[in-house]
Amino acid sequence: MPALPWPYLALLSLGYTLAVAYGQLAWTATISFALLLFAGYAVRQQQTPVGRFLGHALFLVMALALALHLMPGFFNGRAIPTQRLTDDAAPFAMYLNQDKPLIGFWLLLACPWIVGRRSLRLSVYATALGLALSAVLALGGAMLLGMIHWAPKWPEHAWLWILNNLLLVTVVEEALFRGYIQGGLGRYFKQRNHGDALALLLASLVFGLVHAGAGWQWVLLSGLAGIGYGLAYRFGGLAAAIATHFSLNLLHFALFTYPMLA
């Protein structure tokens, strides 16, 4: 049985503490905890394959509900009020979500294999490769589409954005899309030719599609960025995928129009 990935759990715990400090939890939040505990128990037991399948199915339903903020009992506090980071940017506000991190906690506790441990040297190389590719594809593509332009800045609340984006966004999303979906598909396709490449492309497609609410441009750009994140995960493990994703987000935030041109 894989050892629990304590460094990642510590990061999520820090992020969850930050979110709770800015918001509140109602007793109805225990519904989500109970359902996730049941799903985790079903996934970790080895005797009944049907039980494991149902556990994963329940988790996916819960992940969607938590990501869309549909579960009761979570009052996600607004940490950054609506504002324009540059004069020509679309309005931006930031919330510290208390529901979404539960997805990452569940994955790391129930499926610690998602970490995909690699050596530090290999993770650094994979991060550099993934970041270079995702920056060219995603940021370059956004500039070609006229969605962003060069706009260096460092707002006074940048430190809070960094904590939120790393601890409550990037860790959770990479655990789900790269670790769980790409890693899980890689395990499923391991006997097929180019199974890892297929898993990477499918995970990137899913990652793009979840941004459909923001328009086709974001579906395209997110899917392209996902290819860089997926390569980082494939060769450098979860740490490389998180570092790549966060670094690209930081480049976008600090050096270009954020989130996009109005």
Image (cartoon, helix red, strand yellow):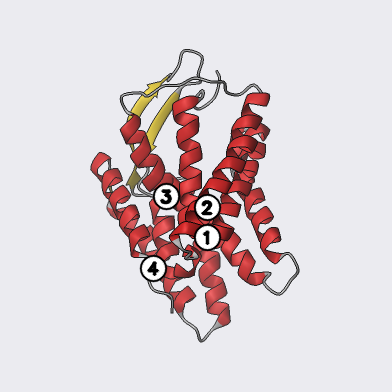
Residue topped by disc 3: 100
Q: Is residue 21 left or right of residue 134?
A: left
Q: In this view, does 8 lie to the left or right of 239?
A: left
Give the labeled residue for mark 1.
179
Determine which residue is flagged by label 2: 125
Dot 3 alpha-carbon crowd within 10 angstroms: few under 14, some 14 to 19, many 20 or more? many
Report how far apart the C-alphas of labels 1 and 3 lie in the structure. 16 Å
Q: Where is residue 250 in the image (x, y as percent from the top left)?
A: 45, 35
Q: Which residue is drawn at 66% across and 60% down?
A: 199
Say which of 65 and 171 sits in front. Answer: 171
Could you give the CA–CA distance between mark 2 and mark 1, rounded to whole angstroms?
18 Å
Q: In what element is the residue under mark 1?
A: helix
Secondary-structure class at tag 3: loop
Q: Distance between the residues labelled 4 and 2?
A: 37 Å
Q: Residue 93, relative to residue 50: is it above or below?
A: above
Question: Which tag is nearer the camera, tag 1 or tag 3?
Answer: 1
| Contact, mark 1 vs mark 3 (Cβ under 8 Å) | no
Identify the amino acid type marked 4.
Leu
**152 or 205, which is in the foreground?**
152
* Residue 202 spot, x, y in % from top left: 67, 55
The residue that mark 4 highlights is: 37
- First in sequence: mark 4 or mark 1? 4
* Residue located at (65% from left, 56% from top): 200
Residue 64 seen in the current view: no
Instruction: Identify the image quadrant of the C terminus.
Output: top right
